[in-house]
Image (spheres, rainbow, N blue to C red):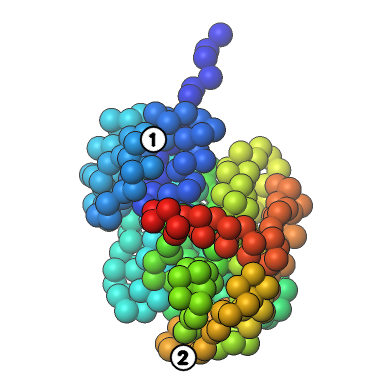
Amino acid sequence: MAQKRMKKILVTGAVGQIGSELTMELRKRYGNDNVLATGRKTKPSKMLLNSGPFEFIDIIIKETVEKVVDEYDIDTIYNMAAILSAVGEEKPLLCWNVNINGMYNILEIAHEREMTRVFVPSSIAVFGPETPQDNTPQETVLKPKTMYGVTKVCGELLGDYYFKRFNLDIRGVRYPGIISSETLPGGGTTDYAVEIFYEAIKNKKYTCFVKEDTVLPMMYMPDCIKGTIDLMDTDISKLKHHCDFNLTAMSFSVGKLVDEIKKHIPEFTCNYKPDFRQAIADSWPRSIDDSAAREEWGWKPEYNLPTMTKDMLDKLSNKLSLGR
Ligand code: AKB
């Protein structure tokens, strides 16, 4: 009887906020040597480097990806490399190149080698001001006003095209803002929801770049990792959607988050100095309907605002006192 092929996984963007924790969880589940972490130029953490293979690649340059895919006999890719919304407005061409041309290379490589499965994340950035902002439906208007959003809509369509046209098993979710204690996010609009915790612990004050009443959908990292891997492990016959699942865990205003942090750090204060990211936040939904994900692959987040806040403060206090 033919032996079942061992999963050999490539994670792009493995030095980033989601990629770093995703890599560690995949290594735990599938074996350290079976998960290749890759990054473009940022130095990987000791944790990433010491727990399994790491290579530098640039997804815009197809050969650099092909080289490691063939060398490590990769059959599954999590393409976490991306330029996020705020940097995307400062460097729109780079955003297009990484998020679209880079993704195109990943899809071509996966298709040419008949890979088992590919994950390509999307984002709430696919929505825009014409989209209903509360309980945003799965199927709705997709007219984003940022370059990042444009690339994410295009990425969803490209993924669905490869699925229908070439039978490539590609999956993805529309991530909300992700809150995490291990690796800082870089260049997004929802970054304030992470920075605020560091500043609350270190300086007891924070200046937020969006207004107090700004409400966005959010999720804590353990739920993000679980949801990502659960979707990838779901039997394909259960899925009606592929690259565009709405996904959320909670929605709160900055003011509500401040109140929650104050329950643990009463002297914490926050003031507000909105910048260009306010307009981006205002164009995104306040809350998301993720019933398709719940019905098709059993999505159910564990953390809400109070439990996430407590866990973040515990983990970060520990990490910062250890000087990590
Ligand atoms: C960003 O703020 O750009 C990202 C996202 C919501 O996709 N965190």
Q: CA distance from mark 2 to mark 1?
A: 41 Å
- SS class, disc 1: helix
Residue to which mark 2 is pinned? 273
Q: Is residue 150 visible?
A: no
Q: In the picture shown, does residue 158 fall above or below 287?
A: above
The quadrant holding residue 184 is bottom left
Report the residue marked by disc 1: 51
The residue lying at 46 percent from left, 91 percent from top is: 273
Give the amino acid type for the residue marked by disc 2 in the picture. Answer: Lys
Q: Nearer the viewer, residue 101 or 42?
A: 42
Q: Is residue 58 left or right of residue 89?
A: left
User: Which amino acid lies under the numbered mark 1 shown in the image of this protein?
Assistant: Ser
SS class of the residue under badge 2?
Answer: loop
Q: Is mark 2 within 8 Å of ligand 1?
A: no
- Quarter of the picture holding the N terminus: top right
- Work out whether 240 lies above or below 74: below
- The picture places residue 119, in percent across and down from the top left corner, at 50, 48
Q: Residue furthest top?
A: 1
Q: Position of residue 26 (x, y in %)?
A: 50, 38
Q: Earlier in the sequence, mark 2 or mark 1?
A: 1
Q: Is residue 49 left or right of residue 321?
A: left
| Towards the viewer: 37 or 265 | 265
Q: Residues within 10 Å of mark 2 (few under 14, many from 20)?
A: few
Q: Nearer the viewer, residue 77 or 302?
A: 302
